[in-house]
């Protein structure tokens, strides 16, 4: 090779250029897991164990013990998780492509329309909508679809913000190197937008966990049915227990999604 | 001027047996009647620019901000599509080639550097070779070679991420990345604009010595006339609409500015700046009967010699070649030269 080294890195005296550099070994690159990730599950576990101990000491009547037993609570919780995750996945499948669409140069003008639709989805009273749809259709899909419309906005907005937040210089260089538009999107823009899109997805998931109980009347399963049943039959112990469980579930799902989000974030920007 | 390959092709295929097979020397770029009018604007941002950029030279486009110099440069790799006019690179009309393919054969360095933050330094440098589907071993050795070329130890830097590097180091990687696929031409948009002055001047020096070996054709955009003087084989001073006010060598522009606009752009000290382009041994040396304590090398510029004399309060200074005195240069000789520019250095 005809090119020779114009400078000798070992012999040159360091200038500002070199001394300003962050030392590689001491740099604080974050790992996916950290000790503080234990805080949320520990607190949640503490509360749930306390609740369990308290309830197991009580004398429960038939209605109460029909709900507050391991089998039915596990079933309801698993259903709740299933419905919520379905909503979150569906939200991602709809809102991320929509966000990509409205940030492309050619389809940018669709942005106001898409955002308007998403805004309506969130602004429409979901309980009312659920009741209305419940007249015509019940079960898993009506609930999932309505609540997807309800929580799509957060992912859509974050996708747009995340994609638009990618450094212009990085995009210019990537295009200037000869990456196609699709390659820039898949290999530069989306990876760099993962933290922001992920934050939106977490919001959507938490929203879903919190709103799935509203679908109790549509028979989609989850912790909504026992919760509202307890309210109707005036069983405060059950109401309280289920409410705490829903809150704990929201916290845990958010916690798990947070770790997932960090794992999906490329190493260089973590 | 180096030998010109007739096409831009050599970087594109896997024909080269290894990275050391050869380096693509520069090829000429010709812009003719190149125009860019943005929609909704009456005045073109770039108005029918025609210029020839000789192979293997650094041509600096310099002008006030908004004059269209960056737009002109970005039309060469079609990041901006020209409204009309043509661009030929090495004799081939590239105005209608596939723009993505075209860019892989043109090095691109920008002020914001634009290293991809989630890719390691090695992955950043490997970007274009990967797009060109080089095999892995070849890419790996090329990455190491390029990092070495820009003065970064591959073992130390290969696996780092961009944010772990200083601005100056990042721009070295930027240059390595642009050179990785060995393009015959490079576009550089204020590449050293965002680093501190000390680093900038060092990067400029290294860039010049690198270019001496590589002989690429380089289009370099800056608003800093002193940078243009330092780096350019030729300078195009542009006014609004990217109209060429003067296109000539730095020496000629300093000695004979075309008009007031160019003069105003040169700013003060044109005479002194000119001294940067002449070496001490271009002057007839006086005999060295009078020894002075201070010496300059024959290869020093007149500017450096004068600076030394002004600084030390001397009227003359010994000139040395390889450390041995060969004569002497006086302040008056330099002043004469400034007032009677060097058409005929023996006069």
Image (spheres, rainbow, N blue to C red):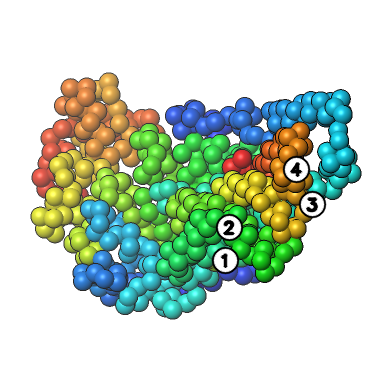
Whether residue B24 is visible: no
**Whether residue B233 is situated above or below residue A37 in the rendered picture:** below
Whether residue A107 is visible: yes
**Whether marks 3 and 2 lie on the same chain:** yes
Give the label, 2 or 1, closer to the camera: 2
Q: Nearer the viewer, residue A180 or A136?
A: A136
The residue lying at 68 percent from left, 55 percent from top is A215
Q: Which mark is residue A182?
A: 1
The image shows residue A27 at horizontal and vertical percentages of 60, 30
Q: Chain of mark 2?
A: A
Q: Which residue is mark 2?
A: A128
Q: Which residue is mark 3?
A: A79
- Alpha-carbon span between mark 3 and mark 1: 38 Å
Give the label, 3 or 4, closer to the camera: 4
- Disc nearer the start of the sequence (3/2): 3
Q: Secondary structure at mark 3?
A: helix
**Whether marks 2 and 1 lie on the same chain:** yes
- Disc nearer the start of the sequence (2/4): 2
Q: Which mark is residue A233?
A: 4
Q: Chain of mark 4?
A: A
Q: Secondary structure at mark 2?
A: helix
Q: Nearer the viewer, residue B119 or A86?
A: A86
- Disc nearer the start of the sequence (2/1): 2
Q: Nearer the viewer, residue A126 or B162?
A: A126
Q: Chain of mark 1?
A: A
Tell me whether the residue at label 2 lies in contact with that at label 1, contact meaning CB atoms closer than 8 angstroms: no
Q: Is residue B153 left or right of residue A249?
A: left
The residue lying at 80 percent from left, 48 percent from top is A76
**Whether residue A56 is situated above or below residue A122 in the rendered picture:** above
- Disc nearer the start of the sequence (1/4): 1
- Alpha-carbon span between mark 2 and mark 4: 23 Å
């Amino acid at each position: 090779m005809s090119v020779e080294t114009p400078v000798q890195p070992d012999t040159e005296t360091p200038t500002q250029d070199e001394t300003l550099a962050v030392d590689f070994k001491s740099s604080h690159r974050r790992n996916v897991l950290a000790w503080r990730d234990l805080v949320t599950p520990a607190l949640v576990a503490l509360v749930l164990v306390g609740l369990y101990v308290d309830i197991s000491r009580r004398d429960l009547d038939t209605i109460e013990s029909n709900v507050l037993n391991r089998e039915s609570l596990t079933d309801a919780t698993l259903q709740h998780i299933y419905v919520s995750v379905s909503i979150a996945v569906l939200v991602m499948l709809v809102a991320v492509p929509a966000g990509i669409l409205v940030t492309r140069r050619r389809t940018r003008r669709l942005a106001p329309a898409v955002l308007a639709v998403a805004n309506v989805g969130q602004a429409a009273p979901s309980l009312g909508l659920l009741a209305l749809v419940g007249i015509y259709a019940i079960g898993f899909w009506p609930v999932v679809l309505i609540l997807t419309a309800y929580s799509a906005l957060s992912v859509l907005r974050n996708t747009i913000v995340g994609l638009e937040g990618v450094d212009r210089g990085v995009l210019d260089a990537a295009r200037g190197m000869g990456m196609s538009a699709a390659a820039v999107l898949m290999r530069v823009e989306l990876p760099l937008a993962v933290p922001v899109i992920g934050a939106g997805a977490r919001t959507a998931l938490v929203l879903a966990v919190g709103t799935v109980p509203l679908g109790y009347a549509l028979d989609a399963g989850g912790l909504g049915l026992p919760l509202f049943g307890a309210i109707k039959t005036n069983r405060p112990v059950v109401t309280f227990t289920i409410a705490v469980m829903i809150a704990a579930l929201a916290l845990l799902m958010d916690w798990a999604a947070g770790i997932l989000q960090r794992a999906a974030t490329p190493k260089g920007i973590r | 001027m180096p030998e010109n390959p007739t096409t831009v092709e050599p970087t594109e295929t896997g024909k080269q047996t290894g990275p050391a097979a050869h380096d693509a020397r520069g090829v000429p770029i010709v812009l003719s009647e190149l125009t860019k009018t943005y929609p909704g604007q009456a005045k073109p941002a770039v108005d029918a620019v025609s210029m020839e950029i000789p192979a293997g030279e650094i041509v600096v486009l310099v002008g006030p901000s908004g004059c269209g110099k960056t737009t002109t440069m970005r039309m060469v790799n079609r990041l901006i599509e020209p409204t009309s006019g043509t661009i030929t690179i090495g004799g081939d009309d590239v105005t209608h080639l596939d723009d993505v393919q075209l860019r892989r054969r043109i090095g691109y360095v920008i002020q914001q550097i634009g290293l991809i933050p989630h890719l390691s330094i090695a992955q950043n440098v490997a970007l274009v070779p990967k797009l060109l589907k080089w095999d892995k071993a070849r890419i790996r050795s090329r990455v190491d070679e390029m990092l070495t070329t820009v003065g970064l130890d591959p073992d130390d830097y290969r696996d780092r991420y961009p944010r772990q590097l200083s601005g100056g180091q990042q721009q070295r990687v930027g240059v390595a990345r642009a050179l990785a696929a060995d393009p015959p031409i490079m576009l550089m948009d204020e590449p050293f604009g965002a680093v501190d002055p000390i680093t900038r001047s060092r990067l400029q020096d290294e860039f010049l010595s690198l270019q001496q070996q590589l002989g690429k054709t380089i289009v370099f955009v800056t608003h800093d006339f002193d940078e243009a003087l330092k780096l350019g084989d030729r300078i195009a001073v542009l006014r609004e609409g990217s109209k060429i006010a003067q296109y000539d060598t730095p020496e000629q522009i300093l000695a004979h500015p075309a008009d007031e606009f160019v003069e105003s752009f040169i700013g003060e000290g044109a005479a002194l700046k000119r001294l940067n382009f002449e070496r001490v041994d271009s002057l007839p040396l006086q005999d060295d009967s009078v020894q002075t304590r201070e010496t300059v090398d024959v290869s020093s510029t007149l500017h450096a010699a004068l600076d030394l004399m002004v600084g030390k309060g001397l009227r003359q200074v010994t000139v040395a070649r390889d450390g041995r005195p060969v004569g002497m240069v006086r302040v008056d000789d330099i002043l004469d030269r400034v007032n009677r520019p060097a058409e005929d250095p023996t006069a």
